[in-house]
């Protein structure tokens, strides 16, 4: 089991490294001079100063060859030094630390909300597959899933903030739940469909298993039967969690823009547009680590639930 | 599901009363992007400048008509040679911590601007020929320049940096850039999570502003900002055409407008054989129906530009008529210049066809529509214009280098603009910003003379001739000058606008008042 997880961990780290190298090369190769964007901004063509541009490039090491920069960034990152932002010269770790709490809280609340609604729906659908509830919920959730989160967010904003005035127009973590209800709800609504679908399938399979049949034959109460099925579905949920992380990160970029929430999504979008490579890489590292951790948890959960998975890997 | 939603609604409703109920003493402004610095020397974006305008007075400020008026300095006056300017600070001007603003701060600020390591790219262009700065006494500093220059005083539309925090430091990364010391009506109280909160600066030398606090919120998304305006979470927001219609129906809002000192244009690379002849360039402009575009795409908030200066600037010549929309005359001009239609309907001359590529940075919808309408008009006239949308960074690099055939852009001008960087023949890339490679010896001579003509009436005459020459040459097709519309909540009064917008003149938003307060500032 430990060897299995260690191997998985090493594999994930390899993947993360690959992603970081790819992002580094992509952002570096993208047209647009980061020095110019940092010093002159996105405005119309303005005054230029070769000395200031050169000083900027030296300060951020942009005058060194690409491979040297890449290796030195990776070396520093291994020591938790993510460098300084091209835009304001502050440490990237600080910029991320300022924006991460809002994004984390919104996403955690979104997952909780989505889980509270989607899991019961999935269980119900699994018990009576093809029933009216199954079909209606399926249709509704698919519709929500296919709505762009940007449009969904605006619709919720119009309803809850403008029409009903229950929530503030601009999200604000300091207002508590009310302050982030809408971005969380937007992300939750989009996440409903995948969670409900995985629940339906996993619980359905568990209910159809010989163990469930035996349980029923023994006269097990439906409630216990459901709980047992949910327990058996745990690995599937863990896997889903790992798959949802990137989706939530991407969703945050748009949702944070709609609700004016100063989170890592907005930071990522700004940084990409201004070619702020250190910040883009730092955020890639953080979200990559989140995926790695979620995947490892999923693997561990699978291995715990079904030791054959780990054994099979080691055989 | 239904129960869960119901519970959610109850919970939200229980969390508090209606949103938008506001304290009368707090002004809520929108920032369209996230400021990176509050140091005016190195700021590069509008949101940064909006905050800075509330925190700092300039040595000299612009009033709403763009006249220079005393700010931190009671005067900035030249000697007879017009090379030496004496800056005299007002008596009793203090930083927010109570320490006096001195001539040493003036010296430190100007020294920082001309230091090549400081990324003060915009400011440095005003002080390129600064020779030295001397402290005369606590309130007076003397700046000596190498050349006399008519727009020199405009360079002193400049806030100060405290010498004790900045001297000898790396200006770009100085921590005070995010914790500035204010000299203006407000000071920074908090900056976190996309919200900047300002409170009255008790050390400010002038009358205290009517609002006790200003909360500036970063809202990049225009549609969200508009909902914020409607619900009262914001007191102002820029309006697009759709939002203007909506805002007009809302009795709690009013519209404030100003003519931007900017114009949109298509630049023709004058070095290419297609664009070398002024008749061709004039014909191109005459093929574009700018009046119709102003009506249909700008909702009437635009007018055809007549030349290289927009209305709202003092030397703009109102008697210079924009070229008319006249496809027949354009065709005649093209024929006369030797560009005849071939069998395929495309005009050619000496084996070269009148076809080219128009580059533009990832455009907004309206710019894209203007481009496409123009493309259609050109096609009917036998001109092939291909389109090359580029990522913004890549686009500006091409423009900076003059490495394009045609391009679509806008130009923002300074309140007292110098046209040389854009039009003088010595300023073609890689030296300057004359990226269309325009060359006209008479225009060069006029620009040089204007730079040293201190009598505004005389300068106005020179400017009029210059505008006529550039309009005749049409190195660009000058497209539109635009009025910008803002929605403002009626609870706020005394909102004035100027050609530089709502913020970057004195008193700007510092002069706004709650509707019920009768106290003038």
Image: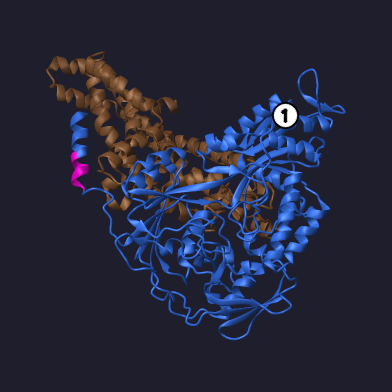
Chain colours: A brown, B blue
Q: In this view of the protein, which residue sits in the foreground, B118 or B103?
A: B103
Q: Is residue B290 rendered to the left or right of residue A156? A: right
Residue B94, above or below B299: below
Q: Position of residue B497 (x, y in %)?
A: 48, 57
Name which residue lies at 80% across and 17% down. B343
- Most extreme residue toward the right, as rendered? B350
Q: Secondary structure at mark 1?
A: helix
Q: In this view of the protein, which residue sits in the foreground, B98 or B471?
A: B471
Q: Residues within 10 Å of mark 1 (few under 14, many from 20)?
A: few
Q: Which residues are magenta?
A: B10-15
Q: Is residue B474 rendered to the left or right of residue A253? A: right
Query: Was residue B13 drawn as part of the magenta stretch in this picture?
Result: yes
> Can residue B405 be seen in this snapshot?
no
The quarter in which the C terminus of chain A is drawn is top left
Q: Name the chief secondary structure element in magenta.
A: helix
The image quadrant that residue B169 belongs to is bottom right
Q: Is residue A243 rendered to the left or right of residue B402? A: left
- Protein chain holding label 1: B
Q: Position of residue A209 (x, y in %)?
A: 26, 16
Q: Position of residue B47 (x, y in %)?
A: 49, 55
Q: Which residue is mark 1?
A: B328
The quarter in which the N terminus of chain A is drawn is top left
Q: Position of residue A232 (x, y in %)?
A: 27, 26
């Amino acid at each position: 089991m430990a060897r299995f997880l260690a191997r998985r961990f090493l594999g994930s780290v390899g993947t993360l490294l690959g992603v970081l190298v790819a992002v580094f090369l992509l952002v570096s190769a993208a047209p647009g001079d980061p020095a110019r964007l940092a010093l002159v901004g996105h405005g119309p063509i303005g005054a230029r100063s070769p000395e200031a541009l050169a000083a900027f490039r030296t300060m951020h090491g942009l005058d060194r060859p690409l491979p040297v920069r890449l290796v030195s960034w990776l070396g520093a990152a291994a020591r938790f030094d993510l460098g300084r932002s091209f835009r304001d010269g502050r440490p990237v770790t600080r910029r991320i630390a300022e924006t991460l709490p809002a994004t984390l809280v919104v996403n955690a609340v979104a997952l909780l909300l989505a889980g509270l609604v989607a899991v019961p729906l999935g269980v119900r659908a699994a018990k009576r597959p093809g029933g009216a509830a199954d079909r209606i919920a399926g249709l509704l959730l698919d519709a929500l899933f296919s709505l762009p989160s940007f449009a969904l967010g605006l619709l919720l904003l119009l309803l809850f903030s403008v029409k009903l005035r229950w929530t503030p127009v601009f999200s604000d973590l300091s207002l508590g739940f009310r302050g982030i209800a809408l971005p969380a709800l937007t992300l939750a609504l989009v996440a409903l469909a995948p969670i409900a679908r995985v629940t339906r399938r996993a619980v359905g399979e568990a209910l159809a298993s010989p163990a469930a049949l035996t349980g029923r034959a023994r006269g097990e109460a439906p409630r216990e039967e459901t709980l047992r099925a949910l327990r058996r579905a745990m690995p599937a949920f863990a896997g889903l969690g790992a798959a949802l992380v990137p989706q939530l990160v991407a969703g945050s970029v748009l949702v944070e823009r709609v609700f004016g929430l100063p989170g890592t999504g907005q930071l990522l979008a700004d940084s990409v547009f201004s070619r702020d490579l250190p910040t883009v890489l730092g955020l890639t590292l953080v979200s990559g680590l989140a995926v790695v951790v979620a995947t490892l948890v999923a693997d561990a959960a699978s291995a715990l639930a079904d030791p054959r998975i780990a054994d099979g890997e080691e055989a | 599901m239904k129960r869960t939603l119901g519970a959610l609604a109850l919970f939200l409703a229980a969390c508090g009363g209606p949103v938008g109920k506001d304290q009368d003493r707090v002004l809520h402004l929108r920032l369209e992007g996230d400021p990176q610095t509050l140091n005016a020397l190195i700021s590069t974006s509008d949101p940064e400048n909006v905050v800075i305008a509330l925190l700092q007075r300039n040595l000299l400020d612009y009033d709403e008509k763009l006249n220079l008026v005393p700010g931190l300095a009671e005067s900035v006056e030249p000697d007879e040679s017009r090379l030496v300017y004496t800056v005299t600070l007002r008596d009793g001007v203090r930083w927010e911590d109570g320490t006096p603003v001195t001539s040493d701060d003036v010296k430190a600020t100007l020294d920082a601007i001309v230091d090549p390591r400081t990324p003060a790219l915009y400011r440095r262009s005003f002080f390129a020929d600064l020779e030295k700065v001397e402290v005369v006494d606590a309130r007076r500093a003397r700046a000596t320049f190498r050349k006399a220059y008519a727009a020199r005083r405009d360079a002193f539309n400049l806030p100060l940096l405290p010498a004790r925090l900045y001297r000898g430091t790396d200006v770009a990364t100085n921590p005070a850039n995010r914790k500035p010391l204010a000299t203006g009506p407000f000071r920074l109280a908090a900056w976190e999570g996309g919200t900047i909160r300002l409170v009255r600066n008790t050390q400010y030398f002038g009358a205290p502003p009517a609002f006790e606090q200003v909360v500036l919120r970063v809202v990049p998304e225009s549609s969200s900002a508009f909902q914020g305006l409607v619900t009262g979470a914001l007191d102002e927001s820029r309006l697009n055409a759709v939002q203007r219609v909506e805002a007009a129906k809302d009795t709690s809002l009013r519209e404030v407008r100003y003519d931007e000192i900017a114009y949109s244009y298509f630049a023709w690379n004058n070095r290419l054989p297609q664009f070398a002849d002024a008749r061709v360039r004039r014909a191109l402009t005459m093929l574009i129906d700018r009046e119709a575009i102003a009506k249909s795409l700008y909702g009437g908030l635009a007018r055809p530009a007549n030349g290289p200066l927009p209305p709202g600037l003092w030397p703009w010549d109102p008697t210079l008529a924009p070229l008319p929309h006249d496809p027949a005359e354009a065709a005649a001009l093209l024929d006369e210049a030797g560009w005849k239609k071939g069998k395929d309907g495309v005009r050619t001359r000496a084996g070269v066809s009148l076809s080219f590529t128009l580059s533009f940075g990832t455009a907004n919808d309206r710019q894209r529509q203007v481009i496409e309408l123009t493309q259609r008009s050109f096609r009917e006239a036998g001109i092939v214009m291909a389109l090359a949308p580029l990522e913004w960074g890549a686009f500006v690099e091409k423009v900076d280098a003059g490495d394009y055939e045609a391009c679509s852009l806008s130009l923002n001008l300074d309140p007292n603009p110098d046209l040389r960087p854009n039009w003088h023949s010595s300023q073609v890339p890689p030296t300057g910003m004359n990226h269309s490679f325009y060359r006209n010896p008479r225009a060069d001579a006029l620009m040089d003379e204007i730079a040293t003509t201190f009598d505004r009436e005389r300068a106005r005459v020179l400017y009029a001739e210059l505008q006529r020459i550039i309009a005749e040459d049409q190195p660009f097709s000058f497209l539109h000058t635009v009025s910008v519309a803002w929605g403002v909540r009626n609870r706020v009064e005394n909102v004035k606008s100027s050609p530089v917008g709502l913020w970057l003149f004195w008193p700007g938003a510092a002069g706004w008042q709650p509707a019920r307060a009768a106290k003038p500032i």
